[in-house]
Image (spheres, coloured by chain):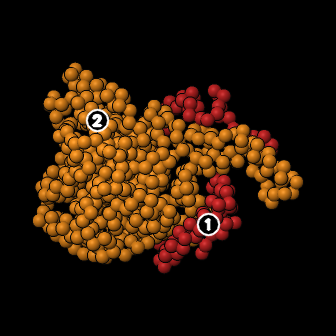
Chain colours: A red, B orange
Amino acid sequence: MGISVEEVRKVAMLARLLLDDEELQAMSEQLTKILDYMELLRRVETSNVEPLAHPLELVSVFRPDQLAASLPREQALACAPRHDGQCYLVPAVLGEL
Amino acid sequence: MSRLLELSAVELAELFRQGELSSSEIVDSFLEQARRWDGTVGAFLQLDAEQCRAQAAAVDEKRRRGEKLGPLAGVPIAIKDILCTAGTPTTCASRMLGNFVPPYDATVICRLREADAVLFGKTNLDEFAMGGSTETSAFKLTRNPWDLDRVPGGSSGGSAACVAARMVPLALGTDTGGSIRQPAALCGVAGLKPTYGRVSRFGLIAYASSLDQIGPLARCVEDLALSLEIIAGHDPRDSTSYPGEVPPYRTLCKQPLEKLRIGIIPEQLEQIDPAISQAIREAAKVFQELGAEFREVSLPHSEYAVACYYIIAPSEASSNLARYDGVHYGYRTDERQMAERLAEERRLASAGKSPEEPDPPLVRLFRQTRSEGFGPEVKRRIMLGTYALSAGYYQAYYLHAARVRRLIRQDYDQAFSQVDVLLGPVTPTPAFRIGERIQDPLAMYLFDLFTVGANLAGICGLALPCGFTADGLPIGLQLQGPPFSEPRLLQLGYWYQQRTDWHRRVPPRLRSESSPAGVSSNR
């Protein structure tokens, strides 16, 4: 079961990646090869097996609901590529720039 | 080479405490070794000599004033550059985090500071720990100290290489699918992947959260025991960290061995490099002399482990790495160029010359930032994971893999009902040549077949040096045990090292007194 260049383009959008034509082509070939290998798993009968998402299978872990200091704003902003001292700055979310 | 470089972390800590050595002397010796060799090996992404000397001077002063000293006082430890260190860049060997300076320490870093260790530089890795050769690092190539034309393994390749090259006695790595055990094996050092939950992951930059675990690399097993004792334990900031007590690993590993049952999987030894199976059989004899009894066992679903892992790990990665958006921290694309390109695309679209609707500006910012910030292997795993989790494929890929994961875990449970630990190989071949596999992602993934099982099942695994190939490349063995059986693995490792000297062998190049004359292929 392969993955076409068109499908790769769609998945790249879901993954918020921008791939040029050459990358789309290479990705389609490599992912096809990898997914072909994954077909191996089809041999395993799992209809009566519960999925294991996590090795600990813990029940919810609770802690007391207490106020604690959080990261100071200037420290949180210090790593941001663009900010105005109060907020992170981003290009227009809707419409034109 | 100074004799001091051959001492274990435990020995150095002891000599420091007794006043035989100052931390400044210790740190200067390792800095000198790094100055001579790291230009060739390339293990470190950053190594700030002044910062190291300042920490050493501080702990010397602490000793002078008679203050209480921590268990690693005065001893240098290298840190894989995926663990957050406050005020020191932490890059994950990615352009995406090339300028990232964390505002906080990872829990393991806090614990090392409390233990009075000297944090000795940040080591190279595969980008975001995705790879098995350290070749996917965006910044530099790390070479195997035993053969400079070969990879050190990965993803903790820098940590393994700097321990092997005696630039440091001890290092921290992380292991998601073998990333501590595999480079340890390829570089001829010891490495421990603790049980999932044993060590807090807070401040470990996430790759696959249900698989990631931090652990130590060193030449001596006793050093692994001491460092695990320091970094293990519950942490309220990691809800998956195990609340149970931390055993005194260092004391326990030296306890006399009682009669143990060791399982061996015959098929494993048939499908690998004959030199490796030979070395494992020799190691089995040593364990037999130590009183172990051998049984043949099987892990029937182990042939599916790589396929299972390369669905689950990329799925988790695609979700974890969604945070790199060019907004909160890290790399951001050039916004002016981006705006110009987008305006051009709009013109084409409105003139009916482009079939595609241009992205809204914020979406384009994310996409362009991520495409420029991530390297090819990271993109490949994000794509694979996004695909495996996407509508229509989730059941066939992710959910099915999660079910197979349980079968893999049940295989281990079954095996550990018959034996105490499993002995086997870490890798199917010794270290491969630089560039040999990087163009073939699947071949690289298949190299992980003996290590991913422990991560999927959440159990612990120890890699130990156990021999050399005819070409002088290190061979590693792997001991795997049930959850929280670290004391037993370390005890077996400790006694194995009392009987063997593989861990004391020095890469031939390092034995020469002259400085390296650059990289050449004469071996």
x%, y% of residue B440? 49, 65
- The N terminus of chain B is located in which quarter? top left
Front-lying residue, A51 or B170: B170
Q: Nearer the viewer, residue B146 or B107?
A: B146
Q: Is residue B207 visible?
A: yes
The quarter holding residue B106 reads top left
Secondary-structure class at tag 2:
helix
Position of residue B441 relative to residue B249, above or below, is: below
* Pointer 2 residue: B32
**Closer to us: mark 2 or mark 1?**
2
Residue A28: which numbered mark, if any? 1
- In the image, taking residue A70 as reference, residue B241 lies left or right, namely left
Q: Residues within 10 Å of mark 2 (few under 14, many from 20)?
A: some
Residue B99 marker: none
Q: Quadrant of residue B464?
A: bottom left
Question: For the point 28% across and 47% down, which residue is it?
Answer: B165
| Number of numbered discs overlaid on the protein picture | 2
Q: Nearer the viewer, residue A96 or B189?
A: B189
For disc 2, the chain is B
